[in-house]
Image (cartoon, helix red, strand yellow):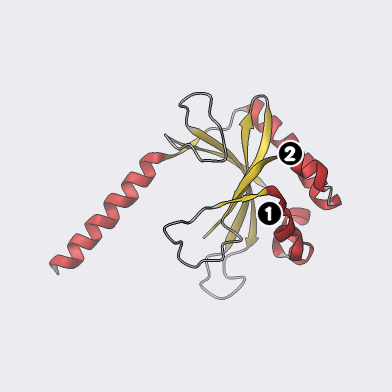
Amino acid sequence: MKKVFIFGFVILMCQSTLAQQLIASKLSYKDSLAVSKAWYSFKNALSKKDIFLLRSFSLRTVQCDLFDQEPIPSSNYNPFISINTFLKQFYHGFPNTKLWMAITTKNCHLSVEVIENFHPKNIQFLNKRDLVIYEIWYVVWEPNEIAKGHEGASDAFEFIKVGKRFKFYGMTSIP
């Protein structure tokens, strides 16, 4: 019983620490318009498979946990891949995915996350600022759609502000 209590306490503390580092912020009207415009252009380039334009909208290396090959990340795990690798893997089966169907038929949800004191290797910060990620979310699987009791799933395209422009930072999903 004591071990269960200690384990529960450790889990609670880890969740508390993570919650302190990841802060949901309000999306300003100006940023909302700008990131929506960037997403619209990015989405059009995706549909046209305009690799040149997609590269210009993106960082050189992007974060993507959707293409992870390792079920449990090793100690040398690196979530960043080149934009060329991302696009190659992305287009391998993308036109026939639930994500593309969601992009073309559903509304998206915009959100912004601030990760305090996080400076990923693929971004050169001019100062010690926090990472602000603008996310475009799509519900890919509705709750109970795959199986009864399944919670559903959503994927997000992530952008960061570089100067006055928004650049594609990567993709993530929940759960």
**Would you place residue 35 above or below residue 44 in this image?**
above
SS at mark 2?
Answer: loop
Q: Residues within 10 Å of mark 2 (few under 14, many from 20)?
A: many
Q: Residue at label 1?
A: 86
SS at mark 1?
Answer: helix
**Would you place residue 95 above or below residue 79 in this image?**
below
Whichever of callouts 1 and 2 sits on the residue coming sooner in the sequence is 2
**Would you place residue 175 above or below residue 32 in this image?**
below
Image coordinates of residue 36 in percent, x first then y, are 71, 37
Check if mark 1's residue and mark 2's residue have beta carbons within 8 Å.
no
Task: Locate residue 114 relative to residue 38 in the image: left or right.
Answer: left
The quadrant in which the N terminus is found is bottom left
Image coordinates of residue 101 in percent, x first then y, are 75, 60
Q: Residues within 10 Å of mark 1 (few under 14, many from 20)?
A: many
**Would you place residue 47 above or below residue 116 in this image?**
below
Residue at 31% from the left image edge and 51% from the top image edge: 14
- Which numbered marker is on residue 57? 2
Q: Quadrant of residue 65?
A: bottom right
Residue at 72% from the left image edge and 51% from the top image edge: 84
